[in-house]
Amino acid sequence: MIKLPGANGVDSGSLPEEVVNRFRGLAALAAVLIILPAFLPNTFYVDVANRVAILAMNAIMLNLLMGYTGQISLGHAGFFGLGAYGSAILTARYNVPPLGGLILSAVVTALLSWAVARVILRLRGHYLAMATLGLGVIITIVLTNEAQWTGGPDGMPVGRFSVLGYSLAGERQWYWVFAVLLFATVVITQNLINSPAGRALQALHGSEVAATVAGVDVRRRKMDVFVLSATVSSILGSLGAHYFGYINPGIADFVQSTELVIIVVFGGMASIYGALIGAVIIGILPQFLAGYDGWDVVAFGVILAATMIFLPRGLVPSLAAAMRPKRGATC
Amino acid sequence: MSPEFIQFILSGITLGATYTLAALGFSMIFNASGVINFAQGEFIMIGGMCASVLVSAGIPLPLACIVGVMAAGLIGYLMERLAVGQCRDAEVATLILVTIGVSMIVRGLTEIFFGKANHGLPHFSSDKPIEIAGATILPQSLWVLAVSALIVVGLKLFFSRTQLGKGMLAASYDRLAAQLVGIDVRRVLTLSFILSALIGAFGGILVTPISTVAYDTGIMLGLKGFVAATLGGLGSGSGAVFGGLLLGLVEALTAGYVSSAYKDAVPFVMVFIVMVLRPQGLLGAKPTDRI
């Protein structure tokens, strides 16, 4: 059998080991998710865990876009905001059931992101950064100004999430929802990346021209990922809104988008567990700096700049490479 | 022309002058290094902030302005030396993120040391509006326009007449060739950061008497400067002036005739439209793909 080097520098001949590693990772994740609640003394900590889980899923989605296809997005929180406000407005003002609101918002976000992707994914580098950033800013401005719908800068309350008469209440119930979703997100994303479609994505990150020559429909693939990650973020936004119980335009703004980008690059581009661990660290850090206004921003800035300078591949891939010097990272 | 319209034009040009200075800073760094400096807005903010803090501490206005500009220059220098210069051959995305990191550090430290409140500066001359054809303009706006024009002309002369300026220009066209004829490319890079920090700080100080400054005003100003530079074509000096003025005018007219709530959305909608029609900017050259 001819050995072809895979996109991660892993020989395709060593695939079984890769599969074993993947299951090890998933087992560890499942174990942590199951045991964790026992170590969370009160609802405050459960709440932090829940927020970290939301952050992690968002970051995994953004990493799919940034890490695997090389498309930078500085406006990803905008899609989260669309889902959150979509659900909030539909349930509060039109009496749409929460699940319906979630689905409707996701469909609208998918259509919007598809329309936007058609235009902006032709752009690259700085221009793509500018366009995605602009999209996020426009979404935030609309959410802030359309006060009759969104409550303006002060935000609006959101009702409980309920399906078929069963309503979710309390941090601990939500924890299990987010834990299951997080696990599913990791499994599905891993499968996606290792599918032919995923290989095509990684190829186009390497060189769009080469990928085109190899028969990858570059434009189509980029659009698919953009729409997928936007739609999932919208769904997360809907769930997040019901969970938080109160939302304001800040959830969609540039600062939030930057935080997601920081998680992705700090944890490691093109690394699912990187996004996860990045979300844990970046999500918990502000808890230690609470009450010290400004220091959290400085800390994020230092982390971001220092990661890019000293660990450009990010935390998890660098650690993985250090532990297995002869092989590429398999996360 | 109605006085109202003239009024909007006047405020648009004043706004546009500030955006022009921000855009010039972007273009200069972009030319020298290929980096989009997301901390450009922080240069603008730190200039105005330092000057206003010093003035409230009793330092005379001219001295405070000079120190404000120098402070920004120092930050520009440190930024290039300690951060951006450390990752020379990195991808575009990496460099963008480094500058975002630096901007967060500067913004956070400003919040810690100077607080969240808005800071102002006294007007440079009288604060009595001057009447022009039924519309009014603040003397401070004239200061903004005059100093901005001086900076634009000064830069033009610097890049076309001085050896240092020509060297910087040469390095931006072809780094390797510039190095071969003896230009210290690293110094050019450092210089471009200092220079664009100085320009940004000038802009920040000039508008602070009109619009005040807070730790987070740099975000929007920087983004709009980026939009202005993109509109005109990244890296083009005349493009920066054109993009800045165009942006200022459209924003002022939108605020006046359409909706003042949505004036901040204008730049981003404009940049979308321009990117669809002419991804290289209105005045930029068509980019070619390097394979």
Image (cartoon, rainbow, N blue to C red):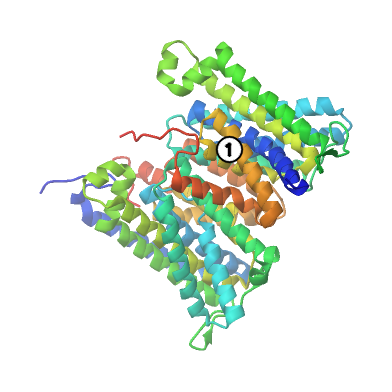
- Label 1 SS: helix
> Within the image, what quadrant is residue B9 found in?
top right
Residue type, numbered disc 1: Gly
**A95, A195: nearer the viewer:** A95
The answer to whether residue A164 is seen in the rendering is: yes
Residue at 24%, 55% (x, y): give it. A17
Q: Horizontal and vertical percent for residue A195?
A: 26, 59
Q: Horizontal and vertical percent for residue B62?
A: 82, 25
The answer to whether residue A232 is seen in the rendering is: no
The residue pinned by badge 1 equals B243
Q: How many numbered dots are placed on residues in this image?
A: 1
Residue at 53%, 58% (x, y): give it. A77
**B117, B284: nearer the viewer:** B284
**B32, A289: nearer the viewer:** B32
Residue at 51%, 61% (x, y): give it. A79
**Chain assignment, label 1:** B
> Within the image, what quadrant is residue B26 found in?
top right
The residue most toward the bottom is A165
Q: Horizontal and vertical percent for residue A8?
A: 29, 47
Residue at 70%, 45% (x, y): give it. B217
Q: Horizontal and vertical percent for residue B234?
A: 51, 34
**A271, B243: nearer the viewer:** B243
